[in-house]
Image (cartoon, rainbow, N blue to C red):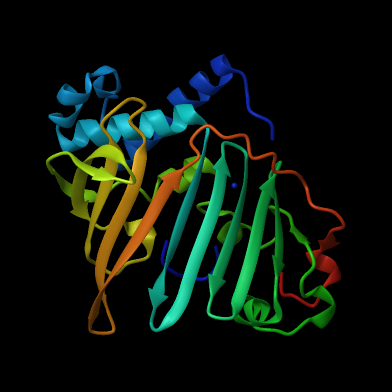
Amino acid sequence: MPPPLPIRRRRATRAARTRVATILLATLSVTFGWGPVSRAGAATPVAFAAESGHQIMTAALAAALASSSCTSATSTKISGQAYSSVTNSALTTGQQTLIIGDAWTVVRVVNGMVYVKENASAMREQFGVDDPPAVNRWISIPKTDSNFARFNTYILLPSMLTEIAPAGALKTSAPSSVDHRLVVGVSGKANIHLGLASGTETVYVSVAAPHVPVEMVASDVVQGQRENFVITYTNWGTNFHITKPSPVLPIAATKLPS
């Protein structure tokens, strides 16, 4: 989950989750031009691993949405700085912790509102100002604020899933093991939402049902050196109990630009 720096309620009933997943998967299929949803999710492990890259990724996104929640995490170095991100994503709530060098930011999304808490370094980097009374405090950002979109992106599960699928012509690899799970790799160009200028990407999908993504490896040349970015996906179907923080300082009550 490379830069830019700006950076996941209670679970619904099974029937409601199924309806939501069907609608969201249809949206993703249109976005990526994949057409009808594949039946690959019902295939046996051997048959599933032999499916096309298109079918495997369609099944993976369907299984991901049906699970309703996930933790995605990465830790690497970017331009010599330590970078780590952990995001708990659900359908309507989520939380992300992002650390770049000595700057850290926590973003929480609950009921259509964004809440941000960060240290002075991150606040200066993201807002371009210093506001000591607002440092290390939860700041609420409504949809009407210009900062809302950049903090809200890729935290809720549907948004996070848009950065998973490789682009272009997809190729598959022979089954292998990742984190003690049998997976099949689907490779293509780097997803545009990853923030990479170019490069390649491989998503490893569980061969056994549910066919959820297990790991992503993206590679690109940064400042003349090739770097790999690895994102892991765990805790599928977990209820994260993400709630509105308290106390909260409205962004309008700070010196931060709106």
Question: Which residue of the protein is positioned furthest toward the front in this rendering?
Answer: 180
Q: Is residue 252 left or right of residue 40?
A: right
Q: Residue at x 40, y 75 (%)?
A: 77
* Viewer-side residue, 76 vs 130: 76
* Viewer-side residue, 41 vs 58: 41
In the picture shown, does residue 250 fall above or below 30? below
Q: Residue at x 24, y 23 (%)?
A: 40
Q: Tell me how many marks there are.
A: 0
Which image quadrant for residue 22? top left
Q: Quadrant of the N terminus?
A: bottom left
Residue 242 coordinates in the image, percent (x, y):
69, 43
* Viewer-side residue, 166 vs 250: 166
Q: Residue at x 64, y 40 (%)?
A: 240
Q: Is residue 79 left or right of residue 84?
A: left
Residue 86 coordinates in the image, percent (x, y):
53, 57
Residue 214 coordinates in the image, percent (x, y):
35, 43
Residue 206 coordinates in the image, percent (x, y):
30, 35
Q: Is residue 239 left or right of residue 217?
A: right
Question: Which residue of the protein is positioned furthest toward the top in this rendering?
Answer: 15
Q: Is residue 99 visible?
A: yes
Q: Quadrant of the C terminus?
A: bottom right
Q: Residue at x 48, y 29 (%)?
A: 67
Q: Is residue 79 left or right of residue 114?
A: left
Q: Is residue 147 visible?
A: no
